[in-house]
Image (cartoon, helix red, strand yellow):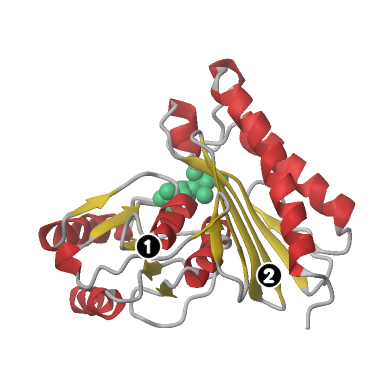
Amino acid sequence: MYPIKNEEILEVAVEASLAASDIIMEAAHNPLIKKVKKSDSDLVTQTDLESEKIIKNFIIKNFPGHSILAEESDQKDNNSDYLWVIDPLDGTTNFVHGYPSFSVSIGIYYKKNPVVGVVLEMPHVKLYTAIVNNGSWCEGNKIQSSKTENIKDSLLVTGFGYQHGDLWGKNMDLFKIFTDKCHGVRRLGSASIDICHVATGQVDGFWEYDLSPWDSAAGILIAKEAGCIVSQLNGMEYNIFNNNILVTNGIIHKEMVKEFINYLN
Ligand code: IPD
Ligand code: CA
Ligand code: CA
């Protein structure tokens, strides 16, 4: 059904993420290498750029005809059925401050559908992978979302984008609404890891308003293959070019969508 075996693609994505993580971890121990660029709060470091270069080189070497969408450089559009969507360092703010939640995220799409996802969590390294229709794995173990049945018994996680415009107030309201209704809402600062934590069942749901394609491209396949449901906040179908996302264990999905719809109306 696919022109290239998904296992072959996974192998290259894993190799690329491991090579990128080597330079990220090296730099994490050496603050001198960190340079701040984009804006006061939306940071970009030399390491973001180096990591992206390494990953792109792996792709170009192995699959020169594929298209690439990566956070820190212009899109490489080869008019291919394959698209690699890369966040070379997700959780840059955490990385800069030595806070333990940052990752490399690589999602591969064939004809706009996710076929392979790789998220490499750092600094306590955990490799999450998924191949479509083949389940999700973390460090060699199959993973499964939680069995939590309602919001009341859940632990949730969210994220806040860098733009503090209209969405800012909504983020704060929703943080409060859900904190009042569940066991707690966490905010870690790496969306790809947040999504993988729903996939492993460590948290029961994740939402965010203002994501970019590379934040969720790999995570959503890992989540779906682990039994999660992924949608927009209003329950409509999600694709990586929608900026708002809800990922849950599936069981509490309807209840959460109802809360968002109530709030948004
Ligand atoms: C950010 C992180 C964060 C999320 C932001 C993203 P970056 O990505 O995933 O958790 O809340 O919306 O932009 O800038 O660290 O790659
Ligand atoms: Ca990101
Ligand atoms: Ca990034």
**Is 24 positioned to the left or the right of 1 in the image?**
left
Tell me: residue 46, above or below residue 198. above
Tell me: residue 233, above or below residue 173. below
- Decide: marks 1, 2 in contact (CB < 8 A)? no
Tell me: residue 73, above or below residue 107. above
Q: Nearer the viewer, residue 91 or 250?
A: 250
User: Which residue is rendered at x = 61% and y = 20% of the image?
Assistant: 33
Residue 245, numbered label: none
Tag count in the figure?
A: 2
**Is 3 positioned to the left or the right of 38 in the image?**
right
Image quadrant occupied by the C terminus:
bottom left
| Alpha-carbon span between mark 1 and mark 2 | 23 Å
Residue 109, numbered label: 2
Q: Position of residue 31 (x, y in %)?
A: 54, 18
User: Which residue is rendered at x = 29% and y = 55% of the image?
Assistant: 168
Under mark 2, the amino acid is Tyr
Q: Position of residue 234 (x, y in %)?
A: 33, 79
Occupied quadrant, residue 245? bottom left
**Is 201 positioned to the left or the right of 190 in the image?**
left
Determine crowd level at label 1: few under 14, some 14-19, many 20+ residues with C-alpha closer than 10 A: many
**Given this view, does label 1 or label 2 mark the residue nearer the observer?**
2
